Image: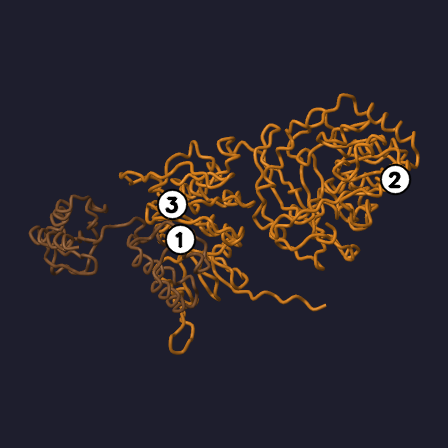
Amino acid sequence: MIAPAKPDLVTVNIDGQEIAVPKGTNVIEAARLVNVDVPHYCYHPKLSVVGNCRMCLIEMGMPAVDPATKAPIMDPATGKQKINWIPRPQIGCGTNVSPGLHVKTTSPMVKDAREGVMEFLLINHPLDCPICDQAGECKLQEQATGYGRGYSRFVEQKNVKPKRTQLGPRVTLDDERCILCSRCIRFSKEIAKDDVLGFVDRGSYSTLTCYPGKKLENNYSLNTVDICPVGALTSTDFRFKMRVWFLKQTIAIDTESSVGANTVVWSREGTIYRITPRRNDEVNDTWLADSARVLYKAVKAVDRLAATETIEALVARAAALFQSAPGAIAVVGSGRSTVEEQFLTRHLATALKASAQLVSRVGQGDKLLISADRNPNVRGALVTGLIKTLPAQQLTDLATQIDAGKIKVVVAINEDLSVAGLTTAQLAKVSIVYLGAHANATSAAAKVVFPTLTVFEKSGAFVNQQFRIQKTLKAVPAAAGATDDLVVLAQLVVAAGGATLPAELAALWKAIAAEVPTLATMTFANLPENGLLLDATPFAALPFVEGETLHYKPAQPAVAAAIA
Amino acid sequence: MNLKPETLSKIDEVITHYPTKRSATLPLLHLIQEDVGHLPPDTSEWVAAKLELQPINVLEVITFYPMFRQKPIGRRHIKVCRTLSCALLGGYKTCATFEQEFHTHLGEVSPDGEVTVDFVECLASCGTAPVVMIDDELHEKVDGAKAKQLSDQIKAEAKKR
């Protein structure tokens, strides 16, 4: 195998530390590698560089050479090559490294420059931090503390601008707080491809505006709130709800499609307040769809199921159903279950000598962070061996078998069978054991209902479209009357006559590692936060439905149309 | 957008002067303002469609430059200089005289529709301060008396029409 070409490395000196960085890196990123913070507002690693906030000013110099002979000029005092420092500060974001570049980020000139920039930025910035949602995660607050002058010389009147402009259905703008960094404008143009934001007027009157008659309403609008370094763009949903420093952060996965965007769930005392993206350069960069941020509302939804019996009683009733119809049982698993649940579902199907199937959910991919496959974990079911082929959208086979009287009991896990093509008559004809968090037609028709958890109340792993296994952690405690899916499934396996399997993640993963070759070397605790790529070659021939999305190219042309 | 045929042909011609269409934004806005007298509300969308931009990109340019007007002005545009030399030599009085003569206020269309008086920054003729530009014509050393004389001239021409 040919070794991959090493990226062109360039050696630079930042505050006296030498470091080799890839060519094309800018000074902010190079400094980050040696743990030197270069404060900035407008620069964002995933957007184009504009250099308009001037906060990242640094002092830079190049090794001196004789203009005629190109021989290095030595400094007799130190015995090293002399550095020609540029007498004026330069912006770090717009300066790419070059061999021998020297950078000072702590010199008096840089300190002065930063104080000056901070002073100008604060001139028209209102002092409403006590009521500002950004407080606690505000770059302006942090950098005013870190690099500001500490007192104000401003005696004039501050500008007055609109305080609560609705830019769109989910974003509210406070124009007075805006420092005109233009990150939101660049995001809308470059990533969301919906160029509706811009600055109108000029000087201190510059105002962030959405083009009259248009709205910032694309499904990625809330990313502008995330990247806003100040409190100008706020989420209408989260606005004035909770101070961010009270919130607990839990890592999670966006389960609305097979992209598996990485998220952080912010909660306090068992209530989730918001979901924000978590950077993963291989999956979602720093972005997240708006639709992924409201998924938490399912936790406290009015249609949550709650048990009226003990789990033992429910299991006993399910066991009786299992014994009443040996060989006439079907298991409908879910592409929305975690890897662990799918593993136990497989065991349940084996113990019941039943075939297991999934229900496919296909929508339109948006080419960014929502793929055509709206099940987050179809590949998990493939990896754990729950299914061998890709699921269909309709359970036609099952319907025929029910009509023929061959199936008497159906175990449905988190899937509404009526949506998957079974009629009310068919549902009435069989005894249904339903596991799920929310009420639906299937739970209403079921003989035994196990209320289980939403994804925010449990830990587990999902395998995304890249065959990257990623973990999600429990953010809030289980709702009253709901039981962990793993506990229910493990008990059902026993009720069906199968082996006793652990319902606790660490122990369960030992069993998974022992049985699933692809996951043989893994434990749940060792799964890195950014996920781990699994070997996808055994499944290369399957016609997956996903089209191209961010950081994902389908191996073969998408056949979504053929399946739909 | 109701533009004259010659403006349209000028617009199509000027676009070819630039390597990217976007660069023609300013010249296009100038041509439209010359034709219509101001930039009507649908200008952004019209220019954006012409140059394959988004309307917000054009609106940013229109609102950035004070030379672009989004409202109609009078038949003539009187620009009185207010920068240092002119201010010292009576630019403010000149300006006030025009306002009184036409019973109007800065930036407004006079009741007879003849003029709009604006107080502007340096017109680059400090040696002959105070100066006034009426449309494209520069008038030097415009004190109160000369301002009155210029106003009378405009009124007389208006009567003839």
Look at the picture and state if A30 lies above or below A244: below
Tell which chain the image draws in brown: B
Q: Secondary structure at mark 1?
A: helix
Left or right position of A181 against A319? left
Tell which chain the image draws in orange: A
- Quote the CA–CA distance across marks 1 and 2: 63 Å
Q: Are marks 2 and 3 in contact (CB under 8 Å)?
A: no
Residue A85, given in percent of the width and then of the height, sits at: 38, 62
Query: Residue A90, can we see it?
Result: yes
Residue A212, given in percent of the width and then of the height, sits at: 42, 45
The residue located at (49%, 57%) in the rendering is A17
Residue type at mark 1 is Ser
Residue type at mark 3 is Thr
Residue type at mark 2 is Gln
Provide the residue designation for mark 2.
A401
The residue located at (72%, 25%) in the rendering is A306
Q: Are marks 1 and 3 on the same chain?
A: no
Residue lying furthest top in this view? A308
Q: Nearer the viewer, mark 1 or mark 3?
A: 1
Q: Secondary structure at mark 3?
A: strand
Tell me the quarter of the picture where residue A408 sits: top right
Provide the residue designation for mark 3.
A207
Q: Are marks 1 and 3 in contact (CB under 8 Å)?
A: no
- Quote the CA–CA distance across marks 2 and 3: 64 Å
The answer to which of A329 and A79 lies nearer the viewer is A329
Provide the residue designation for mark 1.
B44
